[in-house]
Each structure stands twice: as structure tokens, then as C-alpha cells.
Amino acid sequence: MVALAFVVAAAYAVPPAQVSAQSSSALSIAPKKNYVIEPGKSVEDKLVIRNADSNKQLDLTLRVVDFTYTDNGGTPKLFFDPDAPQTTWSLKPFMTIPETVTIPAGGTKSLDMKVTIPKGHGAGSYYSAIVYSSGGGSGNAGGDRSGSVGLSASGVTLVFTQIPGKVSENLTLKKFGAYQNNQNDGAESGYMNFTMKEPFNMAYTLKNNGNVTEAPVGNITLKSMFGQEYTINDVNPTGSLALIGQTRTYTTCIKLKEQDEGTRSSSNSTKTCVSPGLWPGLYTAKLDLFYGQNGNTTQELQGSTWFWYLPWWFILLVVVVLALIAFGIWRITNKVKTARGRRVRLNKSGRK
Amino acid sequence: MHHRLLRLHTLVFTGRGLWTEELIALLLVVLVFVSPTSAVIRFANRSLLMTSTVPSATTSYTISFQYTSPVAVGSVDLLFCEDPIPYLPCVPPPGLSVLNATLGTQTGETGFAIDPATHTSNHMTLTRTSATVPITSSMSSYRFDGVVNPADPTKAFAIRMRSHESLDASGPQIDVGSVRGQVTNSIYLETQVPPMLIFCLAQQVEENCTGTDDTYFKDMGELNSTSTVTAQSQMAVGTNASAGFVITANGDPPSAGTTTIDGMTTPTASRPGTNQFGINLVANTSPAIGENPQGPFTNAVPSAGYGVADQYKYVSGDTVAYSPNVSLMRKFTVSYVLNASPSLKPGVYSTTITFVASGRF
């Protein structure tokens, strides 16, 4: 009885604000899965999930949701609403995954997943996402006019499947040019034809009107009015996709600094754009893009553009030089006029 | 008429000094060097069918295209490179080998064989006994067996093609063009670290996600019209995926019954006495709350709208932080502000915000 009273008293003594969930919210998952599956066949794979928290077990619920693009970048827009209409590219009907999993503290579990494409299914790209949700925090806030915030964490694996065959592929080039990437400064990014700041990026915007996701490859050649030439050999180094219906902007560094992160995967490096050392002046650029699924026509897109890079010091220099030239001309003209006037005066006085 | 001709003759021969043979020759040279860029003719309807797209698998490639120039063709040059652009240096795709490739079925323009003299691991020349004019209206295809696929599924490769009238792919080219291919595989070799995304969330977290304070709820306190109530949470995230990550914030703004304190839809300063709910991911002075992102991977940043001090915003589904490429670990501190007008109905205004971390595509 005393013990019970102690437990009840202890329960009341705990402040209501500090309510903890029973599960950890620290997970490690695969961010993306890619499959090529012929109609009538299936792929069996493993979802490896690790509980990064070394003290608490991780309880997760899993479900498949559809997604599309958010903007002209690579951010998925996930349809969490269970009543959301199924997309035409949904992989949901073909995927089988477990509904729940519990992973001990610091442990790892491999879950079976399967994607089955029915016989006679049409070719194209199909994609959905697996959402892993940990339990959300909740509690009772004190006071009759108060506020509270609960937290919940979810991880997502994007699953892409290509069904081979004849597909409709149609990318159109919407824009191409020098690009000011201000995302890290929180400012607007955009294309430009005149700039006082040295451009670090070139970009191109593509509209995908086909029924497959596309990852174009190709090059950009940049030439200055003084003959300097810069070649960007891989304009889509991360294999970024233009989803069905998406207008996607691909940005690429004119000069790249690659920093290896010490992992053994070939793609694990942080890439940052560094100053390409452009001289002031007029630049022209040419874009050559290729795309096409296996067994389909390889298609080409070409574009050209120009931009002026005129830094403030260069404009100042030009103004000073022009002023000096103007001053020189004025001085010479004045001298000539003075000399001519003197000669005229001398001639007149001589005649007298 | 006669006098007009005489006048023209006089005019031409008056400027005779300007119309030198050298000047005319220079003009011709300029014309010759300028014109070829528009003279390139491409193979039409080019495609590559890889029977297997598994990295390093030995498989068959079927290359199809349409000859477009009505000029006799004696050879077709096939060069396997990472890059499709013909004038750039050719880097052979790692792992690819056509050294043991044999020419199988051919349709359309036929009679070709692989020239052993130029056959290397990334180069083949198709040659035939005599150059003939292709049937330009039909497709031609060539199936090569015994091709070893490239090993890297993260990179596309190309086959640069050229047709020549000569039998050994020398001399002027007639049609040119490239086809694109890529191996795909969802199973990673054990020698490589597979892409992964690590994410944790709580009121306080370790930068590497190995520990949290296991607190997922915060009572922000009594709402009043003279001061701002605040809360703080942390999340750490990292990925070795080349496309980076993105975190979105999802959930309705705080509500009590049918009354909701709306989120600020544009970055706005905190104003006590007005109904406001917002978050940001940087250190603030008004009110003094939050921290700037921590960790060495500075390419992981708060999104526009959530990264300016003393400016708060909340729109459900918005991206609040992202990295455009690899960013191993970075810790973000989320600051929450809640303001109430004097006329706000009494009640407990609560919300649950779900932070969703995903890879980018």
C-alpha cells in the first residue's frame, strides 16, 4: 500500500511537460531503391534499418505512399493522406512490405520487400515511397491558456522501378544559361545574362512530357570573347531525375571542388563550386544533352546562350580608361586649336 | 550599252589593287573553315538495347540507327566512351569490354564484319568488302554478343558512331551520332558502402545520432499578449547519397478545439499580442532562442524562409533543411515561437510536428 502510494505520488510529481515516447527516433535507412523489372517478374530485396540510438529500442510503422515533385528541384512531395488518389505512376499496388518492426537499441534488422509487376503491364517508370514512422510525442500542457508542441520523426525510402519496353520520351529545353545559386544565402536563385558577380554555375531547365523519369547526360562548353574555353564534362553527375510532368532545373559547377568523405563508395564526395577564374567580358555557351531508355531512341537536346560578366572593378577601370582617353583627346584638340590660332595670328601680323 | 560596260570595266580595274589574288584566297579559306559545322549529318533514330543491364554482366548489345546521307558507306566506327560528345577525349567506361564481342544478326544495311585490326576493349570498326549506298529509308541494326557491361551503375556511357566511305573508318566521315546506355543494379557490392540516410529527432540529440534525451514533447507555458512563448528541439541528419537529403515539417499549426493559431506563411518577426506560430533553424535574439546548424558539413543548410535570424515561418509540408549532395552529419536546432492576441480563446493550443527526412531524386 505504501509502495502504491509512493508510485502515485511519484507519478504526480513528474512535470507534465516532460513526457517521453516509448520508442527512439533515431534511424538509418536506404534513401533510394532502383529496380528494372520485366512484366510478369518480381524482385525480392531487403530493407536494412538500423536503430542509431544506443539506449532505446526503435518501434516503426511502415507504409507505402505516392509522391511527385515539389518544385523544380529534387524534393519529393509525399502524399501522406491515406485517402489521396493513387497516382498514374504509383508502385503501391505492386509492393509488399511489413507493417511494423521493432529494432533493439543500437541494432539492425533486414526486412523483406518485394515488387511484382503483373504480366502484360505497360513499359514506363513507376515510383512510390516507403515511410518509416516512429511514435510521436504527446503530453498534457498545464494552464487553461497554454501551448505545447509534440515531435515525431519519419524517414523515407524512394522506390523507383523501370518496366522495360517502348516508352514515350519527351524532354524539352526550357532555359539554359549562367545561374546564380543563392540557396545557401536564403536568397532567390536564377538565370542571368548580365552579372557583376562571377558566376560559379551553369544551369538548364527541362520539362518532362514523357511517361518515364529521365536522367539526361551531356556537356556544356563555355567560351569567352578572349578565347578561353571551359568544358563541363558531366552536367548531371548525381544522375538526378526529371519526374513525369516535372519541369526540373539542373545546376552544375563551372569549376568543381570535390572532397572525398573517406567512404569506399565512388559517389561519396561533397561537391562544391569554386571560382572558375573567369575574365570579365562576353561569354557564349553550348549545351549538348542526351537521353533515352534502354532499347529506345537516344535523343539529343541542344541549346546555346550568352552572358556578360562585368565586375564593378572592371566597369570602374573602363570608365577611368575612357575618361583618360576623352581627356587626352580634349588636350590634343585644345593644343591643335591653340597652335592653329597662334599660326593664324602670326600670319595676320606678318601680313600687316 | 557599250559605254555602260566600259564604265564597269573602268570601275573594276580602278580598284584592281584592292582585289588581289591573296584577298580572294583568304575569303575562300574562311568559307571552307566556317561551313563544316553545319554540314554534320546525324544518324537518325539511334538506339541501344542492352539485353542485360546488370553491371559487369556479359550480354548482347543491339545498336539500331538509320543512315541519313545518300553516300556510299564502307565502314562504321564504334567507340565506347563515358561521354557522348565526339570532339571530347574518350574515357573508356570502367569495366566495359567489347574485346570478345562478335557480330551476330544484322538487318537493313548488311554485309559488315568486325575489323580485327582496330578491335580493342572499347573500339570496333565494322567493315565490308565494298562501299555501297545505304537504303536510307529503312532502319539498320547490329547485334553484338559477348559484350561485358560497365561496372559503375551511377554513370551513363555512350557509343560514338561514325560512318565512312573508306573500308577502314579513315578519311571524311559521313553520318555521326551517339547512343546512350546505363547499367542499373539495386544490389550493392559489399566492398562499397551502400547509400544510407541517418536521422534522429528529440528535444536534444547528439550530432551523430547515437543518443538523444528521449523527449518528444514540450509544454511551452502560459500564453499571454505581452510576451512570446518558445520551445526548442534538435535533429541530426546525414547521408552519403550523392543526391543529398531533404527534411520537411508536417502538421497543422497549434489549435484548441476549433480555434487555430495560424502559422506565418512568410518569414516574419515575432510580435507579441498577435496570433502567430512559426519556426526557424538558426540562432535568434528576438526572442533569444535557437542555435545555428552545427557540424562540419556546411552544404547542409536551412531552407529559404527558415534560415534568417528572428524571422519565423510555418507552412506544413515545407522543406526546412536540405543538402544538395553528400553531407555526413549536421545538427539543426529548431526554434518554435507562439504568440497570442488578447482576444484568443482560452484553451490548450497543441500540435504535433512530424519532421520527415528523405533522399532527393
Image (spheres, coloured by chain):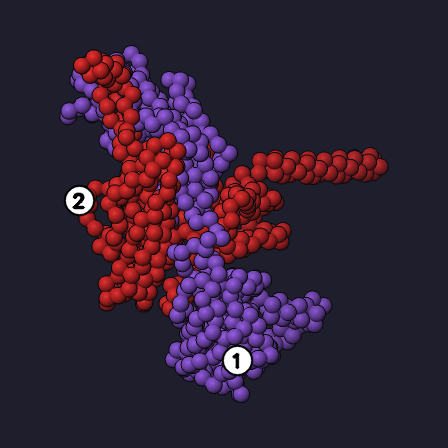
Chain colours: A red, B purple
Question: Toward which corner of the image does residue B323 lie, by quadrant?
Answer: top left
Q: Secondary structure at mark 2?
A: loop
Please report the residue visible at 45 percent of the width from the left and 70 percent of the height from the top.
B58
Which residue has dot 1 on it?
A: B114
Locate residue B179, reporting x and y percent: 45, 67
As shown in the figure, which amino acid type bears the numbered disc 1? Ile
The answer to whether residue B158 is above or below residue A257 is: below
The answer to whether residue A210 is above or below residue A281 is: below
Where the N terminus of chain A falls, by quadrant?
top left
Pointers 1 and 2 in contact (C-beta within 8 Å)? no
Where the C terminus of chain A falls, by quadrant?
top right
A349 or A78: which is nearer to us?
A: A78
The chain letter for the residue carrying disc 1 is: B
Other-residue count near label 1 (Cα within 10 Å), few / some / many at <14 / 14–19 / ≥20 = some
In this orientation, does residue A188 appear?
A: no
Q: How many marks?
A: 2
Q: Residue furthest left?
A: B258
Distance Cα–Cα, label 1 vs label 2? 59 Å
Which residue has dot 2 on it?
A: A83
Q: Which numbered marker is on residue A167? A: none
Please report the residue visible at 47 percent of the width from the left and 85 percent of the height from the top.
B111
Locate residue A227, reporting x and y percent: 62, 53
Please report the residue visible at 23 percent of the width from the left and 63 percent of the height from the top.
A118
In this orientation, does residue B209 appear?
A: yes
Q: Residue furthest bottom?
A: B129
As shown in the figure, which amino acid type bears the numbered disc 2? Asp
Other-residue count near label 2 (Cα within 10 Å), few / some / many at <14 / 14–19 / ≥20 = few
The chain letter for the residue carrying disc 2 is: A
